[in-house]
Amino acid sequence: MCYFLYGAINDGINKDDYEKITKDAEYHFNSGDVNSVNKCVAICDDSYRITLNHCDCNTAIGQKHTNKKELEEIRDLLLNLQNVRGIKYVLISKNWWKETNNKQETVHIQDIDILHFLANMEDNCLYKLELYKKYY
């Protein structure tokens, strides 16, 4: 069958900020949590799909190559989402049709090379990408 990209953002964000940042983006996130996304994946629902594509088999996510324009667009979106008031995290996973997430990982955006992270995402793993600003 096909790959699909799923994801969510936390509740309580400033919707005006979010809409300004994502108005021209190819990726959109509904508010939700880990359980919501995992339930959606389990029943192959589209309520937490982050693209409007028929499928996401051609996605650069998880393809091991960091020099893809798509990854740069997602990176820029993630960096811009940090400016949404109230945002704490983005959930994202890449799943083969009818395969559920068999693990979960949490990373902070300031601790990773975003392009490398996106290029090396594992299938069927739900990633929680924390976006809040860390103070040292």
Image (cartoon, rainbow, N blue to C red):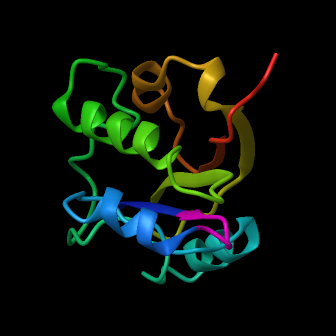
Q: Give the image quarter of residue 42.
A: bottom right
Classify residue 46 as left or right of residue 129.
left
Residue 2 appears anywhere in the view: no
Residue 12 drawn in magenta: yes
Is residue 111 depicted above or below 101 in this figure?
A: above
Residue 93 appears anywhere in the view: yes
Q: Give the image quarter of residue 36.
A: bottom right
Decide whether the magenta segment is chiefly helix, strand or loop.
loop
Is residue 88 depicted above or below 1 in this figure?
A: above
Residue 93 place in picture, x, y as percent:
53, 52
Instruction: Write the residue at 30% across / 66% down.
Output: 51
Residue 11 place in picture, x, y as percent:
67, 72
Instruction: Write the residue at 25% across / 65% down.
Output: 23
Position of the N terminus by quadrant:
bottom left
Residue 16 place in picture, x, y as percent:
43, 72
Position of the C terminus by quadrant:
top right
Classify residue 95 as left or right of residue 134.
left
Is residue 48 depicted above or below 26 in this figure?
A: below
Where does the magenta region start and end?
Answer: 8-13
As drawn, the residue found furthest toward the right would be 136
Instruction: Write the residue at 66% across / 65% down.
Output: 10
Residue 87 drawn in magenta: no
Residue 56 place in picture, x, y as percent:
28, 57
